[in-house]
Image (tube, grey):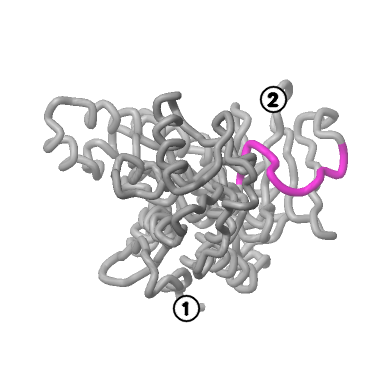
Amino acid sequence: MEERQSVFSVFRGTPALSVILKGVLVLELPDLSQITRELLQQIPRGKVTTYQALAIALGDKIAARVIPQLIAPYESDPNSLCYKVIQSDGMIPARTEVERTEKAHRLKAEGISIQNGQIMPLSKFLFRSFQCDAPLIKLQKTQFETREQLSLRPGRSSYRTAGGIDLSYAGSQGVAAYVSIELLSLQLVRADVDVQEVKFPYIPSYLAFRELPVMLALMKKLKDSAKLADITLVDGNGTLHHRHAGIACQLGVMLDVATIGITKSLLYGHPEKELASLTPGEVCYIEADGEKLGAAIQSKPKVEPFFISPGHKINLETAIEVARACLSEGRLPEPIQLAHNTSQEAAQSLKSRLSSSDKTTSQAKLKPTRSVQKELFDKA
């Protein structure tokens, strides 16, 4: 199978965030903040809109909660139309009463009726007729495309090494850690860290598009240098996802490697039995849409189970076997736990450097050096 190089290059002609590795476009995402700013320019005088209306224009009402974050960079601009964005109940959002009063004054100047901080009647002044190419729908389509390309057959009969990848944050920087272990001994083989700025916001069921650029860059480097483990456990869902194509699936398909999704909470599907009744070592299948998409595994007493689903080039039963073979003292499979610890430590180190007085030196050290990487696996 030929490696996918442009599975997400679907935003040409619209504001986009591109990820280029070795001169090749491997990932292109919509710049939701810039697109939202352009949507605001469409609101006529004497009209307002809501967070939900903007989210629907972007392609999914689930994005309503992130709209304040998307418009925040423009709120201080006196020419911005951010003051026209209100809550679904007609209330004017504001951090302070002074800010609310200022917004109300500007809205009243356009002939908009306001009573006790609420626009009345909202239906008279509400604008929803946005012209937009719905970028979130395009992202959904890429997930469906990924689903069509999934292989849920094991790509090999045995696995000697297993990797884990996780992401932590240092401000706007995403710190990805990839850790490989030997399956028989659970001994550490190597650990690698990469850092990139994260620009895509967190939106439920779109998490992959926030974390993919950093994880993809690190895993591609390791694959190109033949340092990727035989199978990779990803901190995120595989098929146990609203569109059956979580980040573990997308990483697997884009790089044509075997992946498994591991999460600490269940966001989709229904367990076959009460999870509180699980005993150590017990497996409980998770069903959705008429099929078994994943499973809960109770690793030890007095802890919550973790959730597993196939990513790519593996089936559910084999994924369960691999995950159970990776269990040690903790709740989670060892590769995921080590990757989590490593990314957390690297992120904390980066935070310390970024908060130091010498910002220039800190920025120059964003990518971990060989000595920093060695220190990380000595401590992992």
Query: Is 269 in the magenta?
Result: yes
* Mark 1: secondary structure: loop
Q: Residue furthest bottom?
A: 2
User: Can residue 291 be seen in this snapshot?
Assistant: yes
Highlighted magenta segment, given as a residue range: 262-273
Whole-percent x and y of residue 356?
Answer: 18, 25
Whole-percent x and y of residue 70?
Answer: 43, 47
Residue drawn at point x = 70 percent, y = 29 percent: 304
Q: Is residue 13 above or below residue 279?
A: below
The alpha-carbon separation of the residues under discs 1 and 2 comes to 42 Å
Name the kind of residue labelled 2 in the image: Val
Residue occupied by mark 1: 2
Observer-nearest of 38 and 268: 38
Name the kind of residue labelled 1 in the image: Glu
Q: Is residue 18 above or below residue 236?
A: below
Residue occupied by mark 2: 303
Quarter-of-image position of residue 247: bottom right
Q: Residues within 10 Å of mark 2 (few under 14, many from 20)?
A: few
Residue drawn at point x = 39 percent, y = 55 percent: 37
